[in-house]
């Protein structure tokens, strides 16, 4: 089975440029998470979608960050304009959340390593 | 206050040692608990779920103390391949997964 697929794996961009990170969750999963990981702050939850609807975006650091999930098989995280302090590894994860208690753990993609210079 | 707190380590232990990691969580209504493992420059992966009665998977034992809001992971007979960062994870309301900052383990020959 294909796991969570993220692209690109690595991105190097100049300050001020727009960056778009992409994620394809595991088929059948209805929850999608975007995390950011740095040495200083660990793994931070940025935004969480359930059934393609953003449920909680309180972790999005500022208005420069936006995320969309137009359908069940695709999500994007956009940073515009990017800044050097945005440099981090961005992970997408998915899980299944069922009302009857049939929940799965979170499965992670391989991450996108973003460097803003 | 963070949702999940862990000792960052590192824990440096010789092969064959027993090592224990702990974490605490803040939301008493949390329902599900996990330990994830993350290797250097890789994504986190599920190591094991943590059940109320405690559970064991080979050399790994996980315990949950709901009254103290405390989760532990015990690794017996440490192997070099156990070297990694171990993340404590708590699932809160609406299926949100909260991760601790991780505890780094170095197993030395």
Image (cartoon, rainbow, N blue to C red):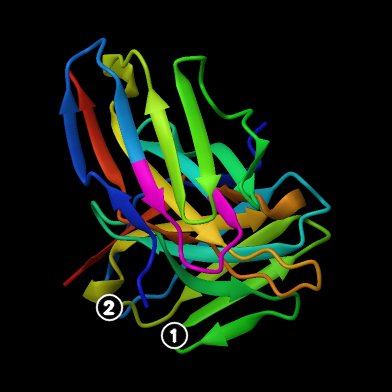
The reply, left or right, for residue A106 in relation to residue A3 is: right
- CB contact under 8 Å: marks 2 and 1: yes
User: Which label was assigned to residue B59?
Assistant: 1
Q: In which quarter of the image is residue A45?
A: top right
Magenta-drawn segment: A22-32
Residue where numbered disc 2 is placed: B79
Query: Could you tell me residue B47's position as x and y percent?
Result: 46, 72
Give me the chain letter of mark 2.
B
How far apart are the alpha carbons under marks 2 and 1?
Answer: 10 Å
Q: In which quarter of the image is residue A96?
A: bottom right
Q: Residue at x 46, y 44 (%)?
A: A75
Q: Residue at x 77, y 55 (%)?
A: B30
Query: Could you tell me residue A27's position as x and y percent?
Result: 48, 68
- The residue lying furthest to the bottom in this view is B58
Q: Residue at x 35, y 43 (%)?
A: A22
Q: Quadrant of the N terminus of chain B?
A: top right
Give me the chain letter of mark 1.
B
Q: Is residue B16 visible?
A: yes
Query: Could you tell me residue B97's position as x and y percent?
Result: 61, 52
Q: Nearer the viewer, residue A27 or B89?
A: A27
């Amino acid at each position: 089975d294909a796991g969570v697929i993220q692209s690109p794996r690595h991105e190097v961009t100049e300050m001020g440029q727009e960056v778009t990170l992409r994620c394809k969750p595991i088929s059948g999963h209805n929850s999608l998470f975007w995390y950011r990981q740095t040495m200083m702050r660990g793994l931070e939850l940025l935004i969480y979608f359930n059934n393609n609807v953003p449920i909680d975006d309180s972790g999005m650091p500022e208005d420069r960050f936006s995320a969309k999930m137009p359908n069940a098989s695709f999500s994007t995280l956009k940073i515009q304009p990017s800044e050097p302090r945005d440099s981090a590894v961005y992970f997408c994860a998915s899980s299944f959340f069922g009302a009857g208690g049939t929940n799965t753990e979170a499965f992670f993609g391989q991450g996108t390593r973003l460097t803003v210079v | 206050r963070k949702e999940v707190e862990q000792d960052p380590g590192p824990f440096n232990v010789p092969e064959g040692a027993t090592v224990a990691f702990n974490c605490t969580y803040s939301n008493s209504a949390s329902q599900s608990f996990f330990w994830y493992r993350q290797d250097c420059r890789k994504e986190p992966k599920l190591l094991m779920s943590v059940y109320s009665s405690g559970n064991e998977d080979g050399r790994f034992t996980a315990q949950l103390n709901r009254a103290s809001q405390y989760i532990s992971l015990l690794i017996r007979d440490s192997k070099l391949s156990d070297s990694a960062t171990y993340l404590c994870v708590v699932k809160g309301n609406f299926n949100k997964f909260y991760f601790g900052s991780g505890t780094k383990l170095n197993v030395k020959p």
